[in-house]
Image (cartoon, rainbow, N blue to C red):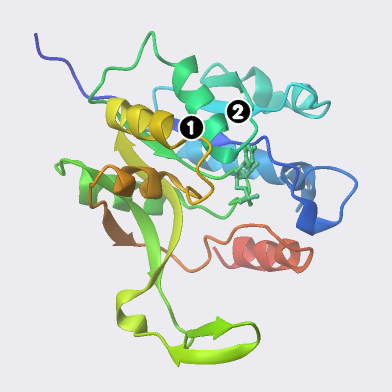
Amino acid sequence: MTHTIKFWAVVPAAGVGKRMNADRPKQYLDLAGKTVIEHTLLRLLQAEVFTAVAVAISEEDPYWAELDVARHEQIIRAKGGKERADSVLSGLHSIRDHAHDDDWVLVHDAARPCITPSDIHHLIDSLVDDDVGGILALPCADTLKSLKGHNILGTLDRSHIWRALTPQMFRYASLKTALEQAVGNPAITDEASALELQGKQPKIVEGRPDNIKITRPEDLALAHFFMEQQ
Ligand code: C5P
């Protein structure tokens, strides 16, 4: 029996964001009158492509339930996990009764609020006929050095080095299997690396440079600026 391929979003949002030095996790900091995570989720919903958006929230999180978006009919709350990969897996479990093995899942960091619906469509249009899937990424503008301690050992060939962004788009079953087998492996810092461990070669699709991840305090001002420009 054939079925229409669906698109799901999974948003890991259970991190504490220590590098922000703030009184709350970075996804709940204010950015132009809304929390970071509200911007992120509203932009995913604006893309009008997802059947549902599963958001992994820590069980001890006192902030999520206060947000209007928590009650949006397309938003599903999943349990946050110890590592990012655990949170993404939990998001996948939360949609298991509705998702088909070959449906597409786009995993997007809660801490990337400047994602544009057009970049989401660009990723989907570029990969929808691909067997494996892939990620938004950016070529590296800086010269890259490999180090021993604080001494430079050499200069890397940056033409082969891209920075991984999100969303990262994979088939439901292959993403779930790859993450289950990768759990606990510290080298798995994104979904693509879990697929790579399976011998797969995800594609890269060039994304927008304003799709930044809020990591340090100054990133909030930068995100605000990018939103005004968009
Ligand atoms: O810490 P970092 O910026 O790499 O986190 C990326 C995303 O993964 C954030 O949206 C964060 O909330 C999420 N995360 C998670 N569960 C964890 C750790 C991080 O959902 N245990």
| Pointer 2 local density, CA inside 10 Å: few below 14, some 14–19, many at least 20 | many
Location of residue 167 in the rendering, given as x and y in whole percent from the top left corner: 43, 47
- Contact flag, marks 2 and 1 (Cβ < 8 Å): yes
Amino acid type at circle 1 is Val
Residue 10 is marked as: 1
Q: Which mark is residue 78?
A: none
The quarter of the rendered structure image containing the C terminus is bottom right
On whether ligand 1 comes within 8 Å of the CB at mark 2, the answer is: yes
- Residue occupying the far front of the picture: 148
Q: Position of residue 33 (x, y in %)?
A: 78, 47
Q: Is residue 14 left or right of residue 203?
A: right
Residue 53 appears in the rendering:
no
Q: Nearer the viewer, residue 207 or 17?
A: 17
* For residue 197, above or below residue 223: above
* Label 1 environment density (alpha carbons within 10 Å; few <14, some 14–19, many ≥20): many
Identify the residue under disc 2. Answer: 56
Q: Earlier in the sequence, mark 2 or mark 1?
A: 1
Say left or right for 204 vs 32.
left
Quick one: SS at disc 1?
strand
